[in-house]
Each structure stands twice: as C-alpha cells, then as structure tokens.
Amino acid sequence: MISKDPVSGRELYTPRMATVKRIERLGEKEKVFEIGFDGGGALGQKPGQFVELSVFGVGEAPISISSSPSRSNGSFELAVREVGNVTAALHHMEPGAKVGIRGPFGNGFPVGDMVGQDLLFVAGGIGLFPLRSLINEVLDNRDGFGRVIILCGSKRPAERMFTAELEQWRQRDDVEFLETVDKGGESWDGNVGVITTLMPKVSIEPARTYCIVVGPPVMYKFVILEAKKKGLPNDRIVVSLERRMKCGVGKCGHCQINGVYVCQDGPVFRYSDTLHLQEAL
Amino acid sequence: MAYHISEAELVGLLGHLALAGGSVLGSVPTSSLPWLDWLGPENSPDSFAQALRMPRSAQSPKGAVLAASESMGRYGRSVATATATPTDSLTIVGVRACELKAIRYLDKVLLDGDFHDPAYEAKRRAMTIVSCDCLDCTDSCFCTLVGGRPFADEGFDINLTGLSDGWVVEVLSDKGHRLFATKPPRATPEQLEQRDQVRRAMTQRIEAQNVRWSLRVEDSTPTRLPEAGGEGWQKFAADCVECGACNTVCPTCYCFYLYDQHAGSEEFERVRTWDSCLLSTYHRMAGGSHVKITPRPQLLARLANRVLHKFTYSPQQHGMLSCVGCGRCIDACLGRIDIRQMVRELSP
C-alpha cells in the first residue's frame, strides 16, 4: 500500500520497481502485460481500481487493472491499447523489462453492494479491460451473486479481446453471455449491430439488478438510455470514467470535475452521482 | 498576547532572524510593487521593514511551500528513493491576511484526505510565519469582497501591526515566542486602540475602492455562477490569451504536473512543476481522433472552470472559497480580465 509517511513520502509520487513477466498480444494495438513487484508483494487491488504505470524516461500514465484480486498469484495484469507515448513504449517491451508502479488508486466497483444482486455487465471495446477484473472476481465467488449477464461489443470480429475467456463465459451455465460486433464479416455468424441492440434481448428485474457499463465515451449515453428503458434507477447504473489522472492521490488537480476528483472519488461512479457533473459523460 | 516594539527593535528582530540560521523570505521595496526575495547581503532587514508598510508583494508566497519546480525523488532500474527532504527552517516575513488564508486552503488540499503531500508537509512544519496587517493596498486588492479582511487573527506565529510609532506584535505560538530573547513590553490599551483604528481605516479603504462591484461572497455563502457551458463566459474568454499567468501568480492555484528527467545513467528524477488549467494541454489524454481526449476543448470552458473552482467547487470540497481577493490575477492578466467584474456580472 501507499505510505502516508509525511517525512519520507516514499511511494506517494515515486514508483515501486516491477518487472514485466509475461506479454500476450490481444489485438492489433492491444497487449496484456503480467507484472510483479520486484521483491514480491501483491498489488492488493479492488476490481475497478487503476495504477500509475511508469516507463522509465518516457512518462507515467493511469492504466486500469484488468486482473481480479481472486486470481492475483502475486502479480497483476494490465491490458493496454497503444495510444500514446507511454503505452507505445510499453508495447515495445519484452518480458523481463522493468517498469514502475504506483497504486492501486481509486474507489473500485461497489462490490459489497452488488452481493446477492443480479449483474448486467455492458462492455464496449476495451471497456472490457477494467470490467474483466470485476467479472472474474464475481465468477470466482459465483454463489455470492444472482444472475450474471454479460453483454460484450466490439467493432469488428478481429477486435474481440480475451477471446478464450469470452468463450469460457459463453459456455458457463450460470452466465448469460451475449456478444455483438458493429460490422461482421464472412467468418462471423454472431450478432451484428452496436451494443445497445443486445439490451432488448435480455429481461431483468430492475429492483435487484446492477448494470455496470464501461466503454468508449460515445457509448454511455445510449446504453444508459436503454438501461433506463428497462426501469433501472440511476443509482443502479454504474460507470467508470476516463480522465487524466496524473498524481492518483487527489492533489494535482488534473482529473477534477466540479468538486470531484476522479482519481479518488472515482473512477467508478453511480450514474446518479454524475448527473450534476456537467462534464462527466 | 500583544506586545509593542519600536521601529529599531523590529529591524533588530529581522536582523536576528538572519543570524539565527535558516532562510528568511520577505518583501523589499521596488519602483512598483514590493518584490519577494531572500534576506541577505542584497536585502537588508531595513528594506524588509520598509516593505511591511507597503502593499502586498507582486508574487505570492505560494512558491515557498509549493515550489515552481522540485524533485519528488530519484529512481533507477533497481531502486527507488524518494527524497527525504532535509528541509531548512524558513521564516516568511510580511505575509498578508489574504496569503494566510491561501496557505490555510493549500493545507486543506495537500494535507487533508488519505494522502499527505510529503514535500509540502515538510516545508510547512519548518516554516515560521511573521504576518503583517496591510497598511497600504493596490488598486486590485479586494479581500473584503470575498469574506476577508486586511489583517489577520489566526494562522501566524507572530503578527505585526504598524503604528505611527513602532509596531504592535501579536504572538500566537511557541515558535513566535522563541523569536524574542527577552519579552518586549505589553502593548498599552492606547496602542491596541490605535491598532484597531489602523485596521478599520484599511478595511474601509478596500471596501471603498471595491464599492462598484457590490459583490459579497463568503466561504459559507458562495455565489451561484453559471455552469461552464453557460451564457456569459464567452465575453471574458474572448479576452483570455491562455497564458496561464493568473494560475502562476495565484496564491491558491496548486495544480501540478509530474514528469521524469534523466539523472545519469539509468537514473531518473521525478519532478513536480506547476501546471495551468487554462492551457489546452492540461487535461489532454492520449488517444486518437475517435475518442474525447479532453473534457474541456474550449478555452471558454477552461476559463469558467478556473473561476468556478475558486467560487463554487472549493466551497463544496473544502468548505472555503479559493479566491482570497489578493488581486494578483488582475495585475497579471494580459487580456485585462478583472475577476471582480467577471464574478459580479455572472452572479445572479
């Protein structure tokens, strides 16, 4: 955990050393990195939290944690799309490379409130990366939850991520799994259409269901509309926001929306708590 | 406890600070506003004492606790070492009431919550504050519009009030008491009455020069400004040239950026530097054209956000306004935006 030591200040702004143990390609611009701290020790994350990842001499960026605490093994996984300087440098790394880690930061998903409830997961594109940590946590404690419904959307069949895991979810009797792609192809015989087209295919009991939505910014509005059509109250719709979380500890100001620090008060919010935040979604 | 010292004794006290070790920061007179500088061969205790009777300095003392650029520690490919800052003692002389309020706000931001900012905390612990009542002000001073007064009754170690003959010294802390080898005589009731007169006169002067803005906001009753996309901001955003000077001179603007610089072979230094929320790069995230890389692509929204932060979000987050009415942003603005005018016009 983060030291609060006011004198040494260790680990508040300087990273802990860690090593990339395993790298697996997920897509054209996406890879998953298994990372462990040098000198051991688990990250101790909650689903939905993030870390600040340093690539030495390049920079630091907030990255959501993709592995569930239930599958920690002393290491954790970051699934990363190559979009900027830090992620590009990370993508050029080989196993054994050193990185720096601060965190975990943020509130994480309200797992405690979800116990015993039905869960409707809506993952758009690489929104699956942070949602995967919660989905696997729930599946590893399956008896603690009601129905598990997973809706997964990708742009094209080639952009489907973690396909082996998707297949496992599809085959489980205790998971209702639906998938779609925006544009299909000859090899694709599944659903075609944006993710909101899957929403009418499932029926839910709104009073005992949480809808957890993570995806690109454009997706939220439409998925939330569909969720509300199903009668879900605003405090049962859960979203995760993306911002420039620079320090991760609620000091530097970059991720502030109104009176809220996304890095500390979020990144996970109930939709009801974002309604007064004009810039949130 | 209030005491009285002569002008010569004040100069003697400042000289004593210089000899006692540690650094002493204060203002020295210039042809325009006093300039914040170090006590030393170039700047005598005499010049520090003169500036105490002048308006607040051009710069705020923010940099003394949150440096414009400072190391947060070094790390390399094998070990990480945060800087265990050996912080020297620092005395700041001539801190004004508005600046004390700003420091109180920075304390809330950087020392409240689950995380304490280590560099800031070390500096605050090592700091002795010698504040002074304002005996003069700039045209841009407006502390009375935002719930402030040009004199302090908390947040200092000792506070000085200039009288026609010498100074009343209020001592609030042990640190303050230790500044005196022998206790000066207690201030007489007449001297305390004179202090009250000085304070009343200065308050009235600042109220009078701001009467046309007829604005009154307090920590507990912040004004209601329109949302960032709302009407009215455009008029002011049109004059903003996005230089960030208001952020830099502001005693409460605390936003910072973290970056790494090379510090030898496979060694890196993590540096913290002031950042400016008006700059278009401030919120920008990595990402291609298909994603929203910044929540505030328009200057108008960034300007509104800065003012809303001072007047609306800070009271929500920390229970106090983060505009203290020092007027530095008015002096510094290349576009001649006057925050008093902006808040006055946009308030209901």
Image (cartoon, coloured by chain):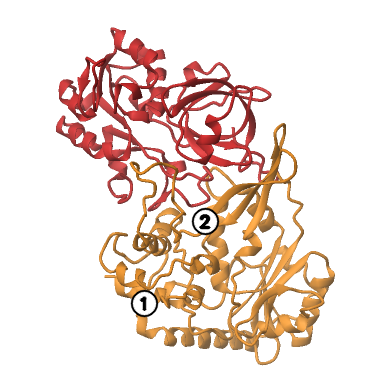
Chain colours: A red, B orange
Q: Do badges 1 and 2 share one subunit? A: yes
Residue B131's image quarter? bottom right
Residue B1's image quarter? bottom right
Q: Chain of mark 2?
A: B
Three-letter amino acid code at disc 2? Cys
Tell me the residue at 70%/39% (across/down). B75
Tell me the residue at 47%/28% (across/down). A65
Left or right: A191, with A14 as reference point: left
Picture quarter with the C terminus of chain B: bottom left
Which numbered disc covers residue B131? Answer: none
Residue B280's image quarter? bottom left
| Vertical comparison of A215 with B48: above or below | above
- For the question of whether residue A141 can be seen, the reply is no
| Vertical comparison of A242 with A139: above or below | below
Inter-mark Cα distance, 1 to 2: 24 Å
- For the question of whether residue A171 can be seen, the reply is yes
Q: Chain of mark 1?
A: B
Question: Residue under circle 1?
Answer: B341
- Element at label 1: helix
| Vertical comparison of A62 with B222: above or below | above
Report x, y in % for residue B313. 40, 57
Tell me the residue at 39%/30% (across/down). A109
- Element at label 2: loop
Left or right: A66, with B175 as reference point: left
Report x, y in % for residue B3. 71, 79
Nearer to the camera, A165 or B289: B289
Question: Residue under circle 2?
Answer: B255
